Image (cartoon, grey):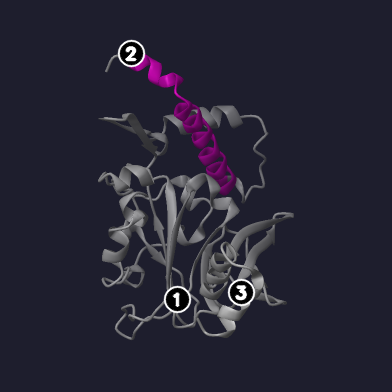
Amino acid sequence: MSESTSNLCDLPIFGELRSELLTAFIAHEQSEQARSRSDIGQPGFVQRLLRWLRSPLAIVLVAVSVSGTGIALAITLGGGHAVTPREWESGHRAVPEQKIVPAQAAQLGILRSARTAYDVVPSSLVPFLANSLFAGANGANFGLARRAQGFSSGAAWVVPGAGNVCLVAVSALSTAGQVPKDAEIAADCKPDRLISEGALAYSGGDDKPDEVFVAGLVPDGVGTVMAKLAGGGEEELTVHDNVYMAALNGSASLYFEAFGKRTNLGEASSLAERNRRKCLATHSAASCKALTEGGH
């Protein structure tokens, strides 16, 4: 390395690390002090912050690797090492997260529950996810997964990753606990720092082109998610263990209202809608309508 290692502290990522540590501490402080209704701004906050930063929970593991493109740094509180999508495409693989970190557990009650046999991700699903960005880039550790309880059909698992929290949901599950071949699968990961903004994953296949299977993650305190349907009207989705999941009739925009504001989760598009938009990119609206009505 031609540059002094002391210059590493000047890299922007270390500024992000300081912000991440403070965010994690505040979440930890709010959780620990909720019963006494204490305020973060009260005397002693700085002293508690300094004590927390010296604790094992705040030990930061820095992984430094040198490649042809330069230095790559991955920093997490739980020992994992994520890689970028481009690095993953080049053959690099993430190191799975080793434990559930405070930033995840403080905002997601499901990750504060004890793990049982019920939480095991189906063996038919793991290879599919392990060979994708889900685990290969985001460092999702299936050994830390928790399955959401309360859904009458389908299943969903929250899987901690390296600086990310991931979700995988399936529209159906066999009596043997495996995923049927015709089941829809929705999976995605989001950085820990964005947990409060929620997450959305969706899937729509050829069998039911007008339907879309949606699933997502929301922080503690959110009880429902609203789906504004493209065809008109809204559908209310109940949250179970920080997870919402449903099969919708057509595309929809999803959001939740909590903490005095409205948070938009994004849009889930059915296969039919995606095909329509693709057609409109190169054809007139009249031509696309004719193609659709003609069954092409």
- Residue at 51% x, 79% y is 209
Residue 276's disc is none
Q: Is residue 49 left or right of residue 159?
A: right
User: Where does label 1 land, which residue?
Assistant: 205
Labels 3 and 1: the sequence-earlier one:
1
Residue 269 shows in this picture: no
Q: Nearer the viewer, residue 32 or 14?
A: 14
Residue 69 coordinates in the image, percent (x, y)? 31, 30
Residue 126 visible in the snapshot? yes
Say which of 151 and 210 sits in front.
Answer: 210
Q: Name which residue lies at 41% across and 81% down.
A: 172
- Disc ID at residue 287: 3
Q: Is residue 11 magenta?
A: yes
Vertically, is 62 above or below 182? above
What amino acid is labelled 1 in the image? Gly
Query: Residue 289: x percent and y percent?
Result: 62, 77
Query: On the image, numbered disc 2 is attached to which residue?
Result: 4
Q: Earlier in the sequence, mark 3 or mark 2?
A: 2
Is disc 2 surrounded by few (<14), some (14 to 19) or many (20+) residues within 10 Å? few
Q: Residue at x 26, y 65 (%)?
A: 127
Query: What are the residue bounds of the magenta stretch?
Result: 4-32
